[in-house]
């Protein structure tokens, strides 16, 4: 009887899906403003992949920066999907708003980064061993598939200076 209960638990337990990073690309359009000394994925354990990004600002201090977040879903190529928002990052960090999309992305990456204060920024930005899990997508349930998150940065005077592409795969029941 106890084996029957154990088998029922195995088939009715938690979902066996996964959320994992598959690729990471960092590109600087203005080498005099921003540089990426490190931008790579690192295997942290069995099936656990972490992102490591080092953003080096060359014109300090940073008093204003505009960030555009866009998500794309891969069908037959990458197509825009669900979000395309633009935020002034200094204002968003000073006045966090839980009703804005940027807040969810910021709180997901906050434990892994040093973006814990408002502007001005006089130092480099680090994201270390950032992993994805299915709890991050509880507020925004995405259907299973391959996605790309694009983070474009503007120096504040409408000159796009860099782009970060995060590719990930979701297969959660």
Image (spheres, helix red, strand yellow):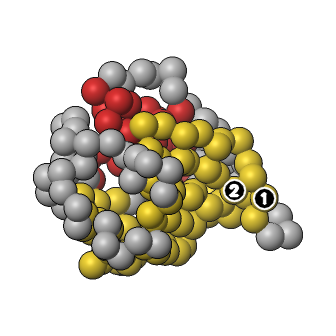
134 left or right of 119? right
Gap in Å between the C-alphas at discs 1 and 2?
Answer: 5 Å
* First-in-chain label (1 vs 2): 2
Mark 2 lies on a secondary structure that is strand
Q: Residue 72 carries which label?
A: 2
* Disc 1 to disc 2: CB gap under 8 Å: yes
79 left or right of 112? right
Q: Position of residue 126 (x, y in %)?
A: 24, 61
Report the residue at 22% width, 35% height from top.
118
Identify the residue under disc 1. Answer: 79
Quarter of the image for the N terminus: give it. top right
Quadrant housing residue 153: bottom left
Q: Which of 133 and 98 is in front in this view?
A: 98
Q: Which of 78 and 160 is in front in this view?
A: 160
Report the residue at 48% width, 57% height from top.
159
Q: Residue 155 carries which label?
A: none
Q: Which of 61 and 75 is in front in this view?
A: 61
Q: Position of residue 107 (x, y in %)?
A: 36, 38
Report the residue at 28% width, 60% height from top.
127
- Mark 1 neighbour class, 10 Å CA radius: few under 14, some 14 to 19, many 20 or more: few
Q: Residue furthest left?
A: 122
């Amino acid at each position: 009887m106890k084996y029957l209960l154990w088998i029922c638990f195995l088939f009715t337990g938690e979902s066996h899906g996964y959320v994992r990073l598959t690729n990471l690309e960092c590109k600087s359009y203005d080498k005099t403003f921003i540089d990426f000394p490190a931008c790579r994925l690192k295997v942290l354990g069995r099936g656990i992949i972490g992102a490591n990004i080092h953003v080096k600002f060359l014109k300090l201090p940073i008093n204003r920066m505009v960030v555009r977040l866009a998500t794309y879903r891969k069908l037959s190529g990458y197509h825009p999907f669900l979000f395309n928002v633009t935020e002034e990052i200094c204002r968003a960090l000073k006045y966090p708003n839980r009703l804005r999309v940027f807040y969810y992305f910021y709180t997901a990456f906050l434990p892994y980064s040093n973006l814990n204060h408002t502007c001005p920024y006089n130092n480099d930005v680090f994201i270390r061993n950032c992993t994805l899990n299915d709890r991050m997508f509880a507020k925004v349930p995405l259907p299973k598939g391959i996605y790309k998150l694009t983070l474009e940065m503007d120096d504040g005077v409408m000159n796009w200076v860099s782009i970060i592409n995060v590719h990930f795969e979701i297969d959660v029941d």
